[in-house]
């Protein structure tokens, strides 16, 4: 990774701005919609099945690109792939806001989610390329802004919708996504001007060829995939359905939207802490279990406690989102190289999001007026068990590349 460490300061600062802007804009396309399901349904037919499909599109899109992005990474420069993903996300959000029928609304939502799916896979190797000595801190900033952007979009959805209509409320975030492309365009322009005068950087040590790393043959790969499956099914079910659950329990639509914003913003404080703790723990399993318990306790309160206390239980459940930061941190903690990070990221997110895509759909499907939301939350509890199994599988201090006979003395100690 020697070449990464020698990135010019100006390039690193531009890349930092680009990573942070992309992080802030990466989830707004998801969280801006669920508070507005009521107003949207007045123009477009949204029944329980259609809403369930809408809820599963994020994880399904992330899964598809989780599988497709790693091969693309071997053929396309990281920065070019990221720019293409920003274009997809922007196009999808504009098209969705203009959606003339439910099919167009769903198709353009899918396009936006495919773009975000590429971002999910590309960010870890980008951090390793530009900031190999700062991956823990930068992962913290990335997850922090991810949560902040999610919360801002959820909180402003109803007020913007009341003022300008739901189409403006969900479409305005396309502008934020477009702005995130600017630092990468500047960075690529600068790289192009010096590309012909530079020689390829030397590597500090041996690393496996990309096609030699097969994460499906490693418990690290499957463990990371199960963590993503468990945390994504829970997080995206909440992003899709939490306002509906709270409205069903007597809360106003605007207050329920604020509760979703509160839930989302709680990813920020834990994201500030989790990577800094996890990178120092050889066996960070207790951190994952703590977040599993937070999810479970919060869900229990949302279902059984008096509605007046809902805010407390939303807070507890929201803290469970720290497991998402745990998942991304473990990708770099359990890999040594940029290629290893990209391959593990793609496999874990591809398999994990594919499994998790049924979560938001089943959450709505399992809800019946007579039974309340208990079966739906019970399904999320099963996914928490899956998450726990994955955390056990990645707990042992080892690196993915070591499973494929790649020697690098001292790497384990340095990374663990």
Image (spheres, rainbow, N blue to C red):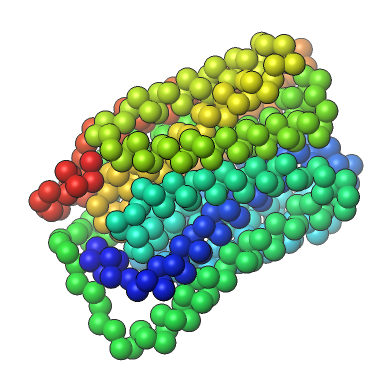
Image check: 282 left or right of 230? left
- Residue 396 in view: yes
Image check: 188 left or right of 94? left
- Residue 33 in view: no
Instruction: Give the percent coordinates (x, y) of residue 103.
Output: 76, 51
Instruction: Give the percent coordinates (x, y) of residue 49.
Output: 73, 34
Res 93 → quadrant: bottom right
Quarter that holds the C terminus: top left
Up-down relation of residue 86 to residue 198 (above or below): above
Quarter that holds the N terminus: bottom left
For the point 72% across and 50% down, the residue is 106
For the point 39% across and 49% down, the residue is 137
Instruction: Give the percent coordinates (x, y) of residue 250.
Output: 81, 20
Image check: 376 left or right of 231? right
Instruction: Give the percent coordinates (x, y) of residue 89.
Output: 62, 60
For the point 36% across and 64% down, the residue is 130
Nearer to the camera, 191 or 380: 191
């Amino acid at each position: 990774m020697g070449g990464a460490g020698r990135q010019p300061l100006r390039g690193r600062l531009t890349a930092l701005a680009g990573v942070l802007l992309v992080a802030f804009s990466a989830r707004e396309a998801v969280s801006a919609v669920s508070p507005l399901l009521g107003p949207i349904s007045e123009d477009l037919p949204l029944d329980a099945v259609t809403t369930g499909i809408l809820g599963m599109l994020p994880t399904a899109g992330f899964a598809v690109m989780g599988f497709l992005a790693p091969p693309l990474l071997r053929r396309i420069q990281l920065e070019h792939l990221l720019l293409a993903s920003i274009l997809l996300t922007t196009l999808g959000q504009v098209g969705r806001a203009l959606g003339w029928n439910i099919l167009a609304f769903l198709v353009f939502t899918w396009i936006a989610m495919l773009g975000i799916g590429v971002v999910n896979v590309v960010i870890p190797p980008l951090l390793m390329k530009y900031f190999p000595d700062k991956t823990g801190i930068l992962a913290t900033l990335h997850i922090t802004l991810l949560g902040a952007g999610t919360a801002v979009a959820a909180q402003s959805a109803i007020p913007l919708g009341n003022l300008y209509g739901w189409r403006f409320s969900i479409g305005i975030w396309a502008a934020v996504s477009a702005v995130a492309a600017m630092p990468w365009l500047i960075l690529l322009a600068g790289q192009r001007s010096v590309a012909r005068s530079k020689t390829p950087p030397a590597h500090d040590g041996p690393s496996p060829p990309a096609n030699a790393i097969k994460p499906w043959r490693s418990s690290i790969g499957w463990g990371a995939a199960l963590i993503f499956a468990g945390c994504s099914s829970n997080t995206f079910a909440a992003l899709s359905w939490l306002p509906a659950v709270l409205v069903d329990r007597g809360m106003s639509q605007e207050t329920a939207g604020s509760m979703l914003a509160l839930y989302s913003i709680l990813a920020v404080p834990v994201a500030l802490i989790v990577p800094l703790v996890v990178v120092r723990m050889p066996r960070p399993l207790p951190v994952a279990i703590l977040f599993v318990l937070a999810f479970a306790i919060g869900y229990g309160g949302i279902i059984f406690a008096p509605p007046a206390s809902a805010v407390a239980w939303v807070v507890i459940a929201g803290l469970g989102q720290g497991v998402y930061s745990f998942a991304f941190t473990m990708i770099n903690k359990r890999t040594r190289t940029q290629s290893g990070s990209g391959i593990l990221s793609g496999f874990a997110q591809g398999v994990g999001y594919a499994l998790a895509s049924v979560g938001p759909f089943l959450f709505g499907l399992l809800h019946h007026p007579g039974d309340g939301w208990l079966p739906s939350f019970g399904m999320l509890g099963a996914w928490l068990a899956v998450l726990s199994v994955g955390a056990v599988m990645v707990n042992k201090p080892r690196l993915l590349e070591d499973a494929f006979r790649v020697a690098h003395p001292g790497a384990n100690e340095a990374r663990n």
